[in-house]
Amino acid sequence: MNEDDLQPRTDLDEQTNISSSIPGIFSRFYSQQKSIYALYSKYKMFFMGLMAPALVVGYVAIHLVEHQIQSIAQERLRGVEGGFGYNHQSLEALKGTLLPFIALRISGYLVCWLAFCFSFAAISVAVHRTINGLDISIHECFQQVRENTASWLLVSLILAGIMGLGVAGEFGVGYMMALVAFKLSLSIWFVHGMSAVVFVIVITFFARFILAIPFVVLDGTRPGQAFYDSTLIMDENLIWVMYLILKSIVLVYIAQEFPFWILRVFSITNIDTWQWWTLWSIGMVGVLYVQPILFIGLSQLQHDRKQMINPLL
């Protein structure tokens, strides 16, 4: 056996030779996307089952937090003239609630984030097992994640901190751009454009570390090494991952809002509470359908490209 026989070969390795040109990049993207949809179509209900707990826990946490904030605000504003209006009486009644409201919202979104990270880790386990020809079950996938709870939780919290700092920076830049636009009488589209640029920069930086989750769950890698290994893979695949993330954001937004767009098409404005919740539930089913595609793509990338870090894996 010669030395070349010891080197693992994957479809992504063969595609690397043609990825230096624009047609090669599109060919590689098409091949990778085809692989994702082939796996997803074969185990669609299974992956949706792994995704479902994140949607239920995450969105329930956010709605509970928003309901609590609204309840506190209503209690403070009871008897205040103008209600929720931006007037002196309302602002005076809500004095001291800004930080508690921010803390509540952060806690809700943090629970949602951890739930999605948990499902991402479980989907990574499922993708790894299917590629290696092993049997899969929802219990086994979640069990492997629970066995690495400490490392998985630490990585997820660090990623949440990175994203939180990025979002705070984005809001800061947006605020400064709004002031500049106001002083120079620039179009509001200038603010939107600069905010979009900052958003892409934040997502690009964040994406470099996202594969740390499957590394700590699948390989038992220490968190610091997992982040480093993730950046090594992203050095060659950042454009592909950015495409996956941005496409997922667009698809999730369309799936969530589509039922309400139908109402606007037919000029329906007044709906009952139960009708609103029905439309929202339909949107969540759409999100449940499209969200696993991103996690499958990231998991496939981590599985295929980790050979370049350690050929023995």
Image: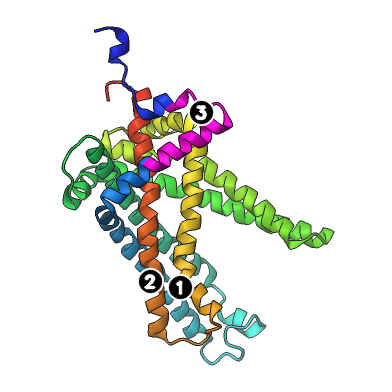
Residue kind at label 3, given as amino acid type: Ser
Residue under label 2, please give it: 282
| Residue closer to the observer: 303 or 16 | 16
Residue 123 in percent (x, y) is at 29, 47
Q: Is residue 72 left or right of residue 150?
A: right
Quadrant of the image occupied by residue 133: top left
Dominant secondary structure (helix, strand or loop) of the stretch shown in magenta: helix
Q: Considering only vertical position in the picture, is 158 above or below 256?
A: above
Point 48% across, 34% down: residue: 27
Measured as percent of width and height from the top left, residue 16 is found at: 46, 26
Q: Is residue 34 above or below residue 277?
A: above
Q: Amino acid at mark 2?
A: Ile
Task: Tell which circle, 1 or 2, labels the residue nearer the N-terminal end.
Answer: 1
Picture residue at 29% right of the left edge, 60% below the top: 52
Q: Which mark is residue 19?
A: 3
Q: Amino acid at mark 1?
A: Pro
Q: Kindly give the residue lying farthest to the right in the view shown.
A: 184
Magenta-colored stretch includes residue 112: no
How far apart in space, not on screen, are marks 3 and 2 (Cα)?
A: 39 Å
Q: Are marks 3 and 2 in contact (CB under 8 Å)?
A: no
Number of marks present in the image shown: 3
| Front residue (pair 284, 103) | 284
Q: Quadrant of the C terminus?
A: top left
Quadrant of residue 286 in the image? bottom left
Q: Which residue is denoted by mark 1 in the rendering?
A: 259
Asked if the stretch drawn in magenta spans residue 29, the answer is yes
The magenta stretch spans which residues?
15-34
Quadrant location, the N terminus: top left
